[in-house]
Amino acid sequence: MYDVQSHLREVLSTLPQGVRLVAVSKFHPKEYIQAAYDCGQRIFGESHEQEIRLKHQQLPDDIEWHFIGHLQTNKVKYIVPYIHTIEAVDSLKLLREIEKQAARCNRRIRVLLELHIAEEATKYGLTPDACRQLLDGGEWRQMEHVQICGLMMMASFTDKQEQLVSEFSQAQEFFNEAKARWFADDPAFCERSWGMSDDYPIAIQHGSTMVRVGTAIFGPRVY
Ligand SMILES: *Cc1c(COP(=O)(O)O)cnc(C)c1O
């Protein structure tokens, strides 16, 4: 078996205080998650509804499951009973559905708004303007079962350092704007989920509070 524990320790040793690790376990077997769990890791990220459902049933109850993928509204009801954080909320429609389903379970779900900054046209997420529009609309303020805890973003898939720096800085700037304009009196709005295996050291230099790292811990995914 892949040496999950030593890779996990290596990644953890590079994270400064105040930056938490979401161990992205998608496509990896539950034994890998258990190995990381046995080292003390409690936050795991998955991006497919059926896969996270199975793993949630098979693994310890005190795991904080984060849904990090694109979530279809018709899947919300399946994850809401146990999900800790939904990281990639990219429409008001999805936010409304989370509110509705969370109310039925009498839960309050933490969510992050997914920001689209990267150049790639295929990525999901709200542009800064679309995000402003959603927040200005104010409907979210009436949602008692949804708590907007910050922003999530994925940088472009590139090894050009300047481009990564530029994208993470834009995300950080937008976070500061959103904090000041809509969440100044809400301490819960504090999370910046950016940084993956190849770019998390740069993300940390640009305000990340939560890195989502898969490959650097669990090795290459077998699809
Ligand atoms: C798969 C995935 C990751 C982890 O990517 P690695 O390169 O394996 O670290 C992070 N965030 C999201 C949204 C993902 O889908």
Image: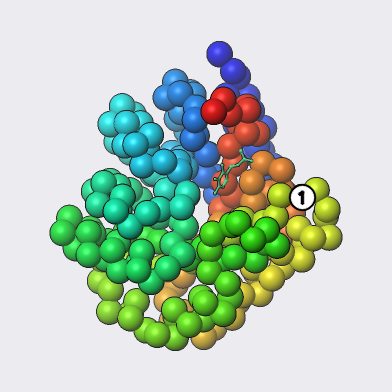
Query: Foreground: 150 or 39?
Result: 150
Q: Which residue is mark 1?
A: 158
Q: Quadrant of the N terminus?
A: top right
Residue most toward the front? 122
- Compared with residue 206, is residue 215 higher up or lower down, i.e. above or below? above
How many marks the image carries: the answer is 1
Please name the residue shown 76% across and 58% down the image: 164
- Compared with residue 8, is residue 14 higher up or lower down, i.e. above or below? below
Mark 1: few/some/many CA within 10 Å (<14, 14-19, 20+)? few
Percent coordinates x, y for residue 77 in the rendering: 25, 52
- Compared with residue 45, is residue 35 higher up or lower down, i.e. above or below? above
Is any part of residue 96 visible from this angle? yes
Percent coordinates x, y for residue 75 in the rendering: 31, 50
Percent coordinates x, y for residue 223 in the rendering: 54, 28
Residue 65 sits in quarter: top left
Please name the residue shown 42% across and 47% down the image: 66
Is 2 situated left or right of 136 in this image? right
* Element type where label 1 sits in the image: loop
Three-letter amino acid code of the residue under disc 1: Thr
Percent coordinates x, y for residue 168 in the rendering: 69, 63
Please name the residue shown 22% across and 64% down the image: 100
